[in-house]
Amino acid sequence: MTRINENRIFACYNISVSLQFHGPLQVEAMQKAVQVLIERHEMLRTTIISLEDQCILPSLKLPDHHSLTIS
């Protein structure tokens, strides 16, 4: 884990990704693909918070629907 600022926010295996597509995008197919990834991989549904210098994995109820912003 890496402490990224003095507010004790931690970056735990974060990877930022930017994709560029050429040609028409089938928005519904893209949304479905992202939803399948989220359902398949628990780490994509995981939230880690910092509390008193410890990383905590809180138990959260996540919504069944995730919106995807395409710009």
Image (cartoon, helix red, strand yellow):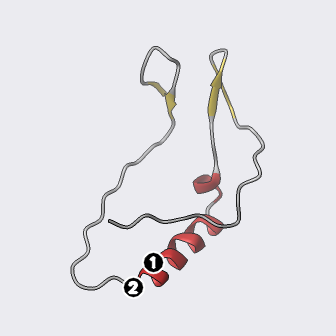
- Quadrant of residue 24 in the image? bottom left
- Residue 59 x %, y %: 78, 43
Residue that mark 1 sits on: 30
Quarter of the image where one finds residue 4: top left
Does the residue at mark 2 contact the one at mark 1 (Cβ under 8 Å)? yes
> x, y percentage for residue 70?
38, 67
Q: Relative to residue 37, is residue 16 drawn left or right?
A: left
Give, as a three-letter code, the residue at label 2: Gln
Mark 2 burial class by Cα count in 10 Å: few <14, some 14-19, many 20+: few
* Residue type pointed to by label 1: Met
* Residue 1 shows in this picture: no
At 58% across and 55% down in the image, what residue appears?
A: 44
Task: Judge whether residue 41 can be spotted in this image.
Answer: yes
Q: Quadrant of the C terminus?
A: bottom left
Q: Which residue is mark 2?
A: 26
Residue 5 location, x and y as percent?
A: 42, 19
Q: Nearer the viewer, residue 71 or 56?
A: 71
